Amino acid sequence: MDPAALPEPVVRTGAIIAVRLFDVAYAIDLATVERVWAAQARPASRGRLTATPPKAVAFDVPPVALVLDPITLVLDRATVAVEVSARVYDFGAISISVRVPVRDLAWSDFVALVSAVDRCVGEDQPDPWADLLHQLRTAITPGLRRPGASSALQEGYLIGVVHTFDQEMTASRLQERVDLVPLLSGERRRLSDGARQDLLRQRFSYYTDDLVVLTWDRAFILEPRGDSDVIDVLEVANAQLLEMRYYDELLDDELPRMYDRVAAERGRLALLSARRFANLARCFQTLVAEVTELTERVDNALQVTEDVYLARIYSAALELFRVSTVSAAVDRKLAIIRDTYSALYDEASSSRSELLEILVVLLIVVEIVLAIIRP
């Protein structure tokens, strides 16, 4: 029978998950976060992958998972109660997830609801994230190390998850029965063949009845066993992108200031230049050390060793999000600062040598003068 002539599949159970990530501090003391959260009689736990052995895939430093109070969203003029949770990472990032449960919804209605959630938590609607972020930051303030001001820099991701349909559904059969492109693109008009191929390029299945399709800002997951490991991996990849973008912008702002400070020091009295250049070089070296330490912690946030399936999804997400491109930009700017540090150190050493030579010459002159005027 022609699949198009069959009844439309119905999503029996599933969810739509909107994730937003923010950089809030240089680092976060997770033990303090757990303590202050527990003091409010709220549940907190260390995040871990539920269905994957720790030796195969594990967090370098497991984030703290927190449960926030539910909120209501208006989705296509209907008020819906949604679950809210958060994760706090030691490298200064937090993620907030809004989960809209789905039951007994026709596929076309499920696709429409994904777009409705996107509009509700997107830039065109009143922002629910600001209140959630303020609530969370206020609660975990004691654990923030060198907290930063609220920044417009953030990352968002939208995931449509189906656990069960009204009929047995394999990954191949699902792709024959429904068109995943509208869900992944958010577009109502039909896309070109090339655009459709790009959207469906990153597809993964481990068993016959599961499916993961990734795009830049959305994903579809068919997971009948209810595992959340893929969602967790996508969140970590987004957190890595956020942090790399943060440090890229930080160094973009720092480089012009660095050039101005070097030029200002060169314009001052030469006799004191050695000490000033040495102090400036130490400032640059401290910046390089701090950024390098944090970027290494971000790079190692997730350790993937034996689970080939999750490793493929994780690598594909990093490629889609262009994390390596942003990371390479950060490395280039760090290299510029390192070169400046080396040049300043050499210049300070040269100035110090010149000062010593001048002092030696002065001592010789003094000795000659004393020998001439001595009775």
Image (cartoon, rainbow, N blue to C red):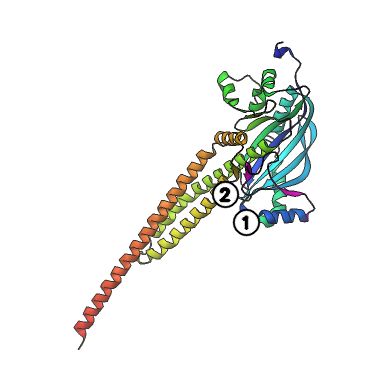
**Marks 1 and 2, Cα distance to the nearest angstrom?**
15 Å
Residue in the picture at 74% in, 14% down: 6
Does the image show residue 148?
Answer: no
Of callouts 1 and 2, the N-terminal one: 1
Left or right position of 324 against 106? left
User: Considering only vertical position in the picture, is 306 above or below 341?
Assistant: above
- Side of 24 where 278 appears, left or right: left
Tag 1: amino acid: Arg
**Image: magenta residue range:** 39-60
- Where is mark 1, residue-wise? 145
Is the residue 27 above or below the residue 130 in the image?
Answer: below
Quadrant for the C terminus, please: bottom left
Out of 226 and 127, give the one closest to the viewer.
226
Whether residue 94 is visible, yes or no, is yes
Q: Nearer the viewer, residue 10 or 369?
A: 10
Secondary structure mostly seen in the magenta stretch: loop
Report if residue 41 lies within the magenta region. yes
Q: Position of residue 293 (x, y in %)?
A: 54, 52
What x and y, as percent, mark residue 186?
65, 27
- Kindly identify which numbered label has been placed on residue 297: 2
Amino acid type, callout 2? Arg
Q: Magenta includes 74?
A: no
Give the total number of marks visible in the rendering: 2
> Badge 2 local density, few (<14 within 10 Å), some, or many (20+)?
some
Q: Which corner quadrant of the image does residue 49 belong to?
A: top right
| Secondary structure beneath label 2 | helix
Question: Could you tell me which secondary element the residue under label 1 belongs to?
Answer: strand
Quadrant of the rendered image containing residue 212: top right
